[in-house]
Structure formats: structure tokens, C-alpha cells
Image (spheres, rainbow, N blue to C red):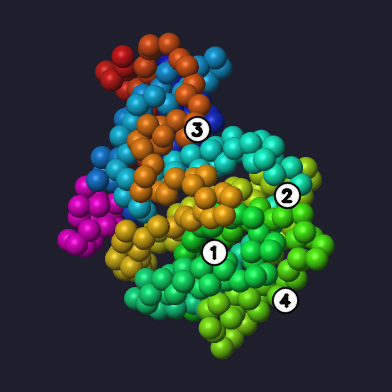
Amino acid sequence: MSQFLTDLAPKETPWDTHRSNAQSVQMLYEYSEEFNKYAERINGCSGILKFGFGEDKLVLKQAFFCRVRFCPVCQWRRSLLWRAVMFQKLEEIKTQYPTHRWVFLTLTVRNCDLVDLRDTLKDMNASWKRMSETVAFKKGVAGFIRTTEVTRGKDGDMRAHPHYHALLLVKPSYFTKNYIKQSEWVEMWQKALTADYAPSVNVKTVKQFAEGQLDKAICETLKYSVKPDDLTLTRDSGAWLHEMTRQTFKMRFIATGGVLKGVLKPDDEITTDEMLTSSEEVEETDERRIAFQYHREHRRYAYAPRFNE
């Protein structure tokens, strides 16, 4: 048998990528005694994967996840679960609201100092609440899924660029009498922010059957909260990651509302079993388990027969 997981199952390459990134994040957390506990948890994350044999592929059946917010493996598994659940619920939503359509909305604010990120995110959340309670929003939007993404600001080493991605389920009237133009979205968001500048806003109508646009919008909305490249940057010895961790402690980065309220679980309510399956449907396998262990020196998963079952 081939030594490495990806030799046997090339589609499992993301495991090597995300676990390697997790190793890098662990090393950055080790630079600070304050975050040693996170480093220890990540060190034990997904060290051994046990797969069952499906019809034509390996199916993950056992793994331990550390559940550290910025662990790249856990961030990836949560994202996969949210996407899978959303894809599964699309038909149900379409049946309930056959004439509704989707709009993909991105809302930004000016970059902030990283030490001010927590307050900025709280202000953004309050601003979203104000905007969602306006007459224009209520007339056109039936429900929403909103996620928070934070990237490194390009205007300084310890700067942050927080923004929202939102998938809006809009009423039929949105495209007639209750249409909200791009400029009006800017005005609504600026007013909600009580900002003295016009924030950058991007709004796109999602054509459900055009080149998988809806699938792309779902994937864009339900992706990572922080880019792996931003998490693993080593030039500052983890200073940005450390402050990011302080600023976002126990904050939720996903919200749902209107007729879509509760369609997705918040990240802190997702169970380990759900992170294993990344789907609401459990794939059946036989009782055999084939094991692969992460090797730090190779940054890859290798076959580990002593853990087979």
C-alpha cells in the first residue's frame, strides 16, 4: 500500500494542506505563553484519521478536532458542514418560496487598528441590525445568512479589514417596486454605520441556474473567517494572530435571520460528529477502519496500520 494518504486517495489532498497550515498556526501560538494552550490543542488536532470504505471512496469516521477558532483544519471542517447543510436545504427553501430569488451582498467598513477590531465588529453588528429593520430592507428581503470575514489590512502590519458576506433571500417584489440599487445599498449601510464616508458595497443578483452561480455564492459566503495565508504569516512572529485571537474571543462569525433564521448552526454549537461527516447525511461503510497519521516532518498524512481496526 502507498505510504501517503494522497497516494491512495488524491481527493484527500486538502487534509495535508489544512493540517500543514494548522502546524504553522501552532508554531505561531507557541511564541506566546498566553496562547500555549491553543498550541497544545492544535498539536493534538486530527493527528490520526480513521476512514471507512465507501462504495468508491474513503469516508472519514474517526478524528479528534481541537475546536480552536483559528485552527485551519477546524475552520475548514465547519465551512464544509455549513455548505453541505445549505446545499441540502436549498430544495426545501425553493419549495417553500418558489418565486423568491437570491442576492449576494458584501458590506465593508474602513480598515481599523487590530486592537480596535472587537469594538468595530460590535459596531458592524449593531449597524446591520439597524439596516435590517429599515422599511426598504424588510420590504425586499425575506431572510439572510451573514458571515464575518477579517483579512489583514494592507495599510499596516497590525491593521484589519473586517467585512460581511451575506446571502439574501429576496421577495419577488425586490426586482420590481422594492428594488434596492447599488447606490441605495451604499446609502443604507452608511446611514446604519453613522459613517462620514461612503463604504464599499458590492451587490450581485444570483442567477440560480447560470454556471452554478448560486453554488458559488454559497461557497463564498460560507468560507473561512480568516484566510489561511493571513493566519500563517510568520514575519511578525504571530503578533497579528495573537491579537486577532484576543479581539475575537467568543464572538460569533455567522448569523441568520428572517425566514432563514436557524438554518445553520453557529460555529460554537457544531458537534465533533458533524465535523466528521461535513453533511447531515451519514455515509454507510463496513466496520473496517484504515488509519493515517500526520507526520510533521513531511507535513503529510501517512498510512498507520497499527491504528487500523
Which residues are the magenta region? Answer: 26-40
Question: The N terminus appears in which quarter of the rendering?
Answer: top left
Q: Mark 4 against mark 2, which lies toward the viewer?
A: 2
Q: Is residue 34 magenta?
A: yes
Q: Residue at x 72, y 76 (%)?
A: 183
Q: CA distance from mark 4 to mark 2?
A: 23 Å
Ranked by sequence position, the earlier of labels 1 and 3 is 1
Q: Mark 1 against mark 2, which lies toward the viewer?
A: 2
Q: Residue at x 49, y 61 (%)?
A: 149
Residue marked by disc 1 = 164
Q: Secondary structure at mark 4?
A: helix
Ranked by sequence position, the earlier of labels 1 and 4 is 1
Q: Position of residue 270 (x, y in %)?
A: 39, 42
In the image, what residue type sits under mark 3? Ser
Q: CA distance from mark 4 to mark 3?
A: 38 Å
Magenta stretch, main secondary structure, is helix
Give the numbered dot on residue 183: 4
Q: Secondary structure at mark 3?
A: loop
Check disc 2: other Cα within 10 Å, few if <14, some if 14-19, many if 20+. Answer: some
Check disc 3: other Cα within 10 Å, few if <14, some if 14-19, many if 20+. Answer: some
Q: CA distance from mark 1 to mark 4?
A: 17 Å
Residue marked by disc 2 = 100
The image shows a total of numbered marks equal to 4
Question: The C terminus appears in which quarter of the rendering?
Answer: top left
Q: Position of residue 165 (x, y in %)?
A: 57, 60
In the image, what residue type sits under mark 4? Ser
In the image, what residue type sits under mark 1? Tyr
Q: Position of residue 192 (x, y in %)?
A: 55, 77
In the image, what residue type sits under mark 2? His
